[in-house]
Amino acid sequence: MLKKLFKSLRSPLRRAKHSHSTPEVLSNRQHPIHRGDISRHAIGVVERLQSAGYQAYLVGGCVRDLLLDLDPKDFDVATSATPEQVRAEFRNARVIGRRFKLVHVHFGREIIEVATFRANHPQDEDDDPRAARHESGRILRDNVYGSLEDDAQRRDFTINALYYDPGNERILDYAHGVHDIRNHLIRLIGDPTQRYQEDPVRMLRAVRFAAKLDFDIEKHSAAPIYKLAPMLGEIPAARLFDEVLKLFLAGYAVYTYELLVDYGLFGQLFPASAAALKHNPDYTDTLIHNALANTDLRIQQGKPVTPAFLFAALLWPALPARVLKLQERGMPPIPAMQEAAHELISEQCQRIAVPKRFTLPIREIWDMQERLPRRSGKRADLLLENPRFRAGYDFLLLRESAGEQTDGLGDWWTVYQDASDSERRSMIRDLSGKDDGPAAPRKRKRSGGRRKRGADAGTTKPGND
Ligand code: ATP
Ligand code: MG
């Protein structure tokens, strides 16, 4: 409703000629934001800084989201106070960050992030070590403080450069962000190519906001992305891990993925998966798509999602070709699978630094795919007790949903989990020769759990059925 109200308002002011220094000002009657929509801690931080004589505003995603009648994820504050000055105002404040110094003010579980106004640094003024640049134009450090006007210009998108003062309830708009919010446009401030070169992660952010807000990327901001996508290779792998989580855990992963593929960004993040998309497009695309749709649904339902499952799914389609290669070199199937998993994960970690606490479960989920077909004797019950069973079983269903033939293995496990003891025993008896890896050609011979190890090692070959 608020959104409608906001949309129905006529553009409050004509575009200021000198937009860099003269903001459009929206009074409280010209926008739908109320103080009551805002975290009281965030308001408290702003007021405290203002009463200490500094300028302070709410800025960025929270103002943008409130204008769109969305719940802000968090509240960011921009101020003329330096990080040290901010810290001095609060007992519960910590200075963080190297590339970009910020202050976190803690209120229980809520953190208000306070950033000092910063300036953009033109490329010809590069001797300043506080604003170090790589020769490609990438900004390495970004700790040159500036005025409010400077701060607005160095922000990424127009819709993220809106400042809200909870005192007089006015919005300051230096970059026509309100106009772009009305028109559902993601637009970089300044020259798009240069702004992407300064920080290639802005390409990912463009896609992320386009998906989250269902906005279009304005054509000049969209045009350079495809060509500049390889610049993501220069971004530290740890930062990319954080960004990838934001991309896929915000509840809009399917659409985000489609945009990443369209803009040539997906292959920069997941090179092996992008290769699989080429070689085995239907299976790979369906599997990733289904995994992400499931993630989106869980987030919508307020259920937890684990990055491990997500990465396991994103990388899985790249696995079989590697397993095969190792097998062709004479390695038996199980070691080949484990070795391929190891290689793939190490390679991926050079791009995106997936922490150990996730890579381990990824491998366990994959390992489980080898074990789920082998159910004879006590194996099925042992598997059920495995803490990774649920993830492994969900992963099996995911593979099946992408068209993998597993001879009804998913259904079998679905029934088995709810079966009584005697039903379970009879299900195991009925298995007879089925207790193989699904890739192994089914032999009529009874297995009795004594088949040669190498023969039952197959991971199903995705999509070849
Ligand atoms: P959300 O928190 O909903 O994901 P957000 O816009 O608040 O969105 P943050 O990553 O929290 O995004 O960043 C806060 C603000 O800092 C942004 O709105 C933007 O103004 C600025 N900003 C963040 N990253 C960059 C960047 N790479 N380049 C320029 N400005 C940035
Ligand atoms: Mg934010």
Image (cartoon, rainbow, N blue to C red):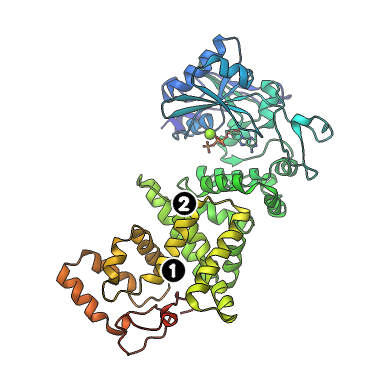
The relative height of residue 341 versus residue 457 in the rendered view (above or below) is above
Q: Nearer the viewer, residue 283 or 165?
A: 283
Q: What residue type is labelled 2?
A: Pro
Q: Do the CB atoms of the residues marked 1 and 2 lie less than 8 Å apart?
A: no
Q: What element carries label 2?
A: helix
Where is residue 431 drawn, in percent x and y?
Answer: 27, 80
Where is residue 422 drawn, in percent x and y?
Answer: 15, 72
Horizontal side, residue 207 vs residue 143: left or right: left
Q: Which of marks 1 and 2 is nearer the N terminus?
A: 2
Closer to the eye: label 1 or 2:
2
* Ligand 1 is within 8 Å of the C-beta of the residue at disc 1: no
Image quadrant holding the N terminus, namely: top left
Q: What element carries label 1?
A: loop
Q: Nearer the viewer, residue 447 or 110?
A: 447
**What distance separates the C-alpha of mark 1 from that of mark 2?**
20 Å
Q: Which amino acid does label 1 sit on?
A: Ala
Horizontal side, residue 391 vs residue 203: left or right: left
Residue at image location 55% in from the left, 44% down from the top: 242
Q: Residue furthest bottom?
A: 444
Query: How many numbered discs?
Result: 2
Disc 2 packing (10 Å; few <14; some 14–19; many ≥20): many
Residue at image location 35% in from the left, 70% down from the top: 372
Residue at image location 48% in from the left, 32% down from the top: 74
Where is residue 381 drawn, in percent x and y?
Answer: 26, 67
Where is residue 75 drawn, in percent x and y?
Answer: 50, 28
Residue that numbered label 2 is attached to: 307
Q: In which quarter of the image is residue 120?
A: top right
Residue that numbered label 1 is attached to: 402
Q: Nearer the viewer, residue 216 or 378?
A: 378
